[in-house]
Amino acid sequence: MRIRVLSWNIWMGKYLPKIIDLLKREYPDIIALQEVVQNPDGTENTAERIAKALGYHWVFANVMRVPFGDTPLDWGEAVLSKYDIVSSVKHDLLTAHKRIALQADIRVGTATIHAVSTHIIHSHQQPSEEQQEQVDQLCGAVPKDHTVIMGDFNAVPESETIHIMKKSLVDADPANQPTWCVYPDGCKECKLGEVKHRLDYLFTTPDLSASDYRAISSDGSDHLPIIADITTKLSIDSRPRMY
């Protein structure tokens, strides 16, 4: 079985038409999104707009409420899928600055794939014990097989944060292609005007394998999207059902 997965920190959907155009072009089977926003009353969810444009199933989990101009917004993680999402779980990563991991259990033929989207705290590319605590909790919370963990880890490849992830999971990109920062205002402290650091990752449990990984050139966010094909020995015996 082979499925294509994509992960993207969409920067609160500032350039939503560009995001949708790229996702339509790439047409992955499963999408993990970070920095998804919705109105506090649950309306106008960015992930829902993308899912409707693509014809995908979707789930969202809120992390926190953030200021956005004069109107606060709920800010969190989402997973979108061509295939049925049969259940979802919100894993709290509890440190001083709370983050989460959203696990979507997706039925692909006779198999269930666990697709996880997460967004670890930003430490300006510096060592962070809080990051390490969050990924420790993440690794302990998710299933140990048929799992793909995607997201913005805000950690460079040589960090202890990523070393912890690699103890039990496989990194889809050993070449460490950079994914951040497309826009200088992606971080007012870092002020990067070039794509210099790898902060976005795609990890799999050892029973899966990843191929054809790439970071996709785009100005739809301050992060580049990342994409790969995931293979398992299980077979697909049904076609995806769309909304």
Image: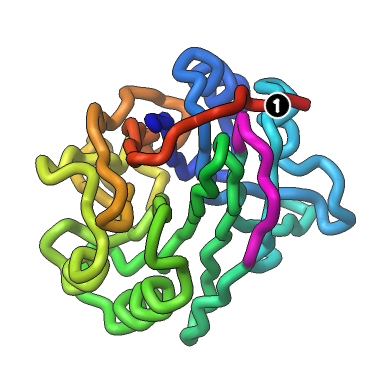
Q: Quadrant of residue 125?
A: bottom left
Q: Is residue 233 above or below residue 50?
A: below
* x then y, percent, for residue 36: 62, 47
> Quick check: is 85 in the magenta stretch?
yes
> Quick check: is 15 in the magenta stretch?
no
State the residue at coordinates (81%, 51%): 39
The part of the chain drawn in magenta is 81-89
* x then y, percent, for residue 154: 33, 59
229 vs 20, left or right, is left
Residue in front for this viewpoint, 196 or 120: 120
Residue in front for this viewpoint, 82 or 132: 82
Q: Is disc 1 surrounded by few (<14), some (14 to 19) or many (20+) residues within 10 Å? A: few
Q: Secondary structure at mark 1?
A: loop
At label 1, which amino acid type do we have? Arg
Instruction: Report if residue 68 is visible in the image.
Output: no
Residue pointed to by mark 1: 241
Residue in front for this viewpoint, 72 or 102: 102
Q: Is residue 29 above or below residue 100?
A: above
User: Residue furthest toward the right?
Assistant: 41
* x then y, percent, for residue 30: 52, 36
